[in-house]
Amino acid sequence: DAGITQSPRHKVTETGTPVTLRCHQTENHRYMYWYRQDPGHGLRLIHYSYGVKDTDKGEVSDGYSVSRSKTEDFLLTLESATSSQTSVYFCASREPYNEQFFGPGTRLTVL
Amino acid sequence: KNEVEQSPQNLTAQEGEFITINCSYSVGISALHWLQQHPGGGIVSLFMLSSGKKKHGRLIATINIQEKHSSLHITASHPRDSAVYICAVRPKTSYDKVIFGPGTSLSVIP
């Protein structure tokens, strides 16, 4: 399996606070993704990156920003967390034309 | 209408049964993926297909590109196969993203 880690694995925060989730991969994959998974919605793409400093929005990008300053790291930031952002967040990475490898997930609760 | 649909939504089987999960999609694709997610667990890639059939242990995945349909079969099912199985497609027009199906929740009873 590809080496993809996420930190933190669990986080509880309050509405209005900023939150940053980190994804780290050791496979030198070009593409990286942030998804959220909610009951009844399945996996939905938040943002993705196709190279260092190259990012694009997914279908549920409002309220989220990302940054990728190094190949191995992809950060997801909630500038001002809301209760609707309570979810499980998954990071994934891949090489072009290959399968995606997923991180273990981060469970975020916004009170 | 969702671009990727799966059936059944939920499935309960007795240990040892042969299981089939279906995926149908409406867009032209370059590849189709089958993923597995155990309760409370991470997501693991089982197969990536662009044609034909692949087999790994007790799992078999097939795809019919003309009919826009794929099936995941589990032979001699076991309680440890209990998980959500997710079909995902990579559209030809957007090769850097995938579209996920809603998942099929499988429970295998001893």
Image: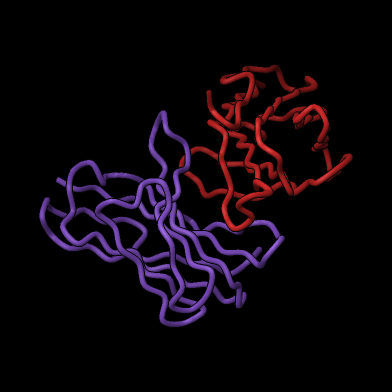
Chain colours: A purple, B red
Image location (x, y in percent) of residue A98: 71, 60
Image location (x, y in percent) of residue A23: 43, 68
Give the number of marks. Answer: 0
| Quadrant containing the C terminus of chain B in the rendered view | top right
Q: Is residue B10 above or below residue A44?
A: above
Left or right, A5 with reference to B94: left
Q: Residue most toward the bottom?
A: A70
Left or right, A49 with reference to B91: left
- Residue located 13% across and 60% down the image: A17
Q: Is residue B58 above or below residue A91?
A: above
Left or right, B50 with reference to A104: right
Image location (x, y in percent) of residue B32: 71, 43
Depth check, front residue: B105 or A92: A92
Q: Is residue B13 above or below residue B97?
A: above
Depth check, front residue: A64 or B19: A64
- Residue located 49% across and 60% down the image: A33
- Residue located 84% across and 43% down the image: B57
Image location (x, y in percent) of residue A44: 44, 44
- Residue located 57% across and 20% down the image: B9
Left or right, B20 with reference to B2: right
Q: Residue most toward the right?
A: B52
Depth check, front residue: B70 or B109: B70
Quadrant in which residue A7 is drawn: bottom left
